[in-house]
Amino acid sequence: MSKLVEFFMNLELIDWIFYLVGGLMVVFSIFAVEAKRIFDSVLALSAVSLLSVLLFIVLKAPDVAITEAAVGSCLASAVMIFALFRMKAGEKK
């Protein structure tokens, strides 16, 4: 038990950020797979993409972070939401 306490006491702030963001990415990924509504899955996938942008920024890879923010978070999410609304609009007719 003391080894575990010693491990957590020796972590730096950057390590805490990695573990927190990584854990949140796992939680949102599981939620995206298990969600009952498709819109909730799309939002969870967008959150995973935004969290990966945060990790890229912390890792000092701004070019990758900007690309992920533009393509992964914005464009892909917008296309999925647009397609979802188009599917729902087609069902009403």
Image (spheres, rainbow, N blue to C red):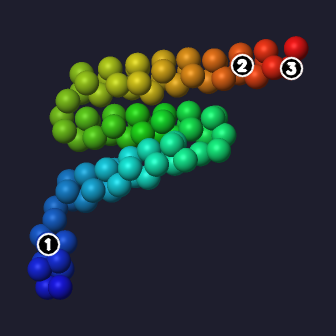
Quadrant of the rendered structure where residue 6 is?
bottom left
Disc 1 crowd rating (10 Å Cα; few below 14, some 14-19, many 20+) is: few
Image location of residue 28, percent across then percent down = 46, 47
Residue closer to the observer: 12 or 30 = 30
Q: Earlier in the sequence, mark 1 or mark 3?
A: 1
Q: Earlier in the sequence, mark 1 or mark 2?
A: 1
Q: Are marks 3 and 2 in contact (CB under 8 Å)?
A: no
In this figure, what is the number of numbered marks?
A: 3
Q: What is the secondary structure assignment of the residue under circle 1?
A: helix
Task: Give the vertical position of 48 relative to 87 (above or below).
Answer: below
Residue closer to the observer: 35 or 64 = 35
Residue 27 horizontal side relative to residue 41, left or right: left
**Label 1 vs label 2: CA separation?**
50 Å
**Label 1 vs label 3: CA separation?**
57 Å
Give the amino acid at mark 3: Lys
Residue 22 horizontal side relative to residue 8, left or right: right
Residue closer to the observer: 53 or 4 = 4
Q: Earlier in the sequence, mark 3 or mark 2?
A: 2
Give the amino acid at mark 2: Met
Q: Residue furthest right?
A: 93
Q: Which residue is the site of mark 3?
A: 92
Q: Which residue is the site of mark 1?
A: 7
Q: Which residue is the site of mark 2?
A: 87
